């Protein structure tokens, strides 16, 4: 089975660990002697409640979530949260600060403007989002209800290397593309949300980690399905949750334990990224998009400078089993997404292919 698989560098939905997929396949028609698949179970059944409770407990343990915060499983992915966060939080002062460092941060900024007075605290658009603003460059308002940023910018290949200091204003962070890749101090955040389709599970859900003190202050027209207080009270089961995605997340968390948890994952992450960036530094053909100090360990963006050559590279890479390397249309070039499930071997083989391609096309 392993020999038939390709190296999938997709930005999301992304590859999952092979052992997780094999376990899911083995349990597909009969989960633990229940005689049925998780896809068929009532979300109110004891057997699914056990899956839910274990998955939630494992996530809290692995991320070291403090008792002040609750973990929610919400449908709609991270984009759903672009509306949910302002609807729930902006009522305090009617204002919020947004730091725009990429495509999804900009989408969140535009969505939030429907619900209050949104200030642009900083933007990296002036250089096509190839850098992350420094702390002293952030124009933050003391009366903001919250400050939003996106920790890793999938499209442009940049990643925040620090947590913004907001002087007590709640921090809302979209961690969709780097959650579970390294330890995080959850206590610094009012809300962390993340679409699961990159490092956690199949698409269709967002994990929301919220300081419970922030819930219960939603705007009066907030839909119940977006109401954090409702979801806390109903333990993410106001309606039928994405049961199979929760089950798959549980399997991924068990796999993470075998990898040494978040400290083990961080070491692997650093090894993968170093392999690729070290080669890009020495390459005469390929040039990275992001500034060195802002480069993402999850999404490596690069190009040759020649669109035809870029297209040739993507085509030949695909033929060799390295797929989904074409860059986002707003950046062009190539993008290698090297999330948690990508083995180091995959990056080693990609670099070897890139060296051969450079030699043949110099």
Image (tube, grey):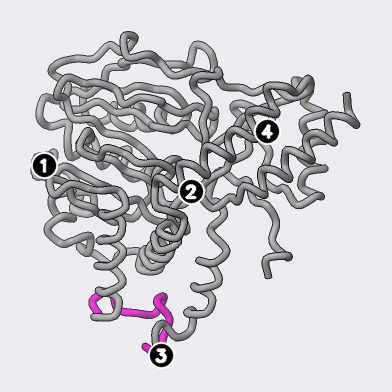
| Secondary structure state at the residue bearing disc 4 | strand
- Measured along the vertical axis of the image, is residue 6 above or below residue 64? below
| Foreground: disc 4 or disc 1 | 4
- Residue that numbered label 4 is attached to: 334
On whether residue 109 falls in the magenta region, the answer is no
Q: Residue at x 31, y 72 (%)?
A: 51
Q: Earlier in the sequence, mark 4 or mark 1?
A: 1
In the image: residue 263, left or right of residue 46? right
- Residue that numbered label 2 is attached to: 198
Q: Are marks 3 and 4 in contact (CB under 8 Å)?
A: no
- Measured along the vertical axis of the image, is residue 191 above or below residue 118? below
Place residue 266 in its image quadrant: top left
Q: Residue at x 29, y 22 (%)?
A: 164
Q: Residue at x 20, y 62 (%)?
A: 238
Q: Earlier in the sequence, mark 2 or mark 4?
A: 2
x then y, percent, for residue 147 = 25, 25
State the CA–CA distance, disc 2 to disc 4: 18 Å
- Measured along the vertical axis of the image, is residue 20 above or below residue 163? below
- Residue that numbered label 1 is attached to: 220
| Secondary structure state at the residue bearing disc 2 | loop
Q: Earlier in the sequence, mark 3 or mark 1?
A: 3
Place residue 120 in its image quadrant: top left
Q: Are marks 4 and 1 in contact (CB under 8 Å)?
A: no
In the image: residue 45, left or right of residue 248? left
- Residue that numbered label 3 is attached to: 35
State the CA–CA distance, disc 3 to disc 4: 45 Å
């Amino acid at each position: 089975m392993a020999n038939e698989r390709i190296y999938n560098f997709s930005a999301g939905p992304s590859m999952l660990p092979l052992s997780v997929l094999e376990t899911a396949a083995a349990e597909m028609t009969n989960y633990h002697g229940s005689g049925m698949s998780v896809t068929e179970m009532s979300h109110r059944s004891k057997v699914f409640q056990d899956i839910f409770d274990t998955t939630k407990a494992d996530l809290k343990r692995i991320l070291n979530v403090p008792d002040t915060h609750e973990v929610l499983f919400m449908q709609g992915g991270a984009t759903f949260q672009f509306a949910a966060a302002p609807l729930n939080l902006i009522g305090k002062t009617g204002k919020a600060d947004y730091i725009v460092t990429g495509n999804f941060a900009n989408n969140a900024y535009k969505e939030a403007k429907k619900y209050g007075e949104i200030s642009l605290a900083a933007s990296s658009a002036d250089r096509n989002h190839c850098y992350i603003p420094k702390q002293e460059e952030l124009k933050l308002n003391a009366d903001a209800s919250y400050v939003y940023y996106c920790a890793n910018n999938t499209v442009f290949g940049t990643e925040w290397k620090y947590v913004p200091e907001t002087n007590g204003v709640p921090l809302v962070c979209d961690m969709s593309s780097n959650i579970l890749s390294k330890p995080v101090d959850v206590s610094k955040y009012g809300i962390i949300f993340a679409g699961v389709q990159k490092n956690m599970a199949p698409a269709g859900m967002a994990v929301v980690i919220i300081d419970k003190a922030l819930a219960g202050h939603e705007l009066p027209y907030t839909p119940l399905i977006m109401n954090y207080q409702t979801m806390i009270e109903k333990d993410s089961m106001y309606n039928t949750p994405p049961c199979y995605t929760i089950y798959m997340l549980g399997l991924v968390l068990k796999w993470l334990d075998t990898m040494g948890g978040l400290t083990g994952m961080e070491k692997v992450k650093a090894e993968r990224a170093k392999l690729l960036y070290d080669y890009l530094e020495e390459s005469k053909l390929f040039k990275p998009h992001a500034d060195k100090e802002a480069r993402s360990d999850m999404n490596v963006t690069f190009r040759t400078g020649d669109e035809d050559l870029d297209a040739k590279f993507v085509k030949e890479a695909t033929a060799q089993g390295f797929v989904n390397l074409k860059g986002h249309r707003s950046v062009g070039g190539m993008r290698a997404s090297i999330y948690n499930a990508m083995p180091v071997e995959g990056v080693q083989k990609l670099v070897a292919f890139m060296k051969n391609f450079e030699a043949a096309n110099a």
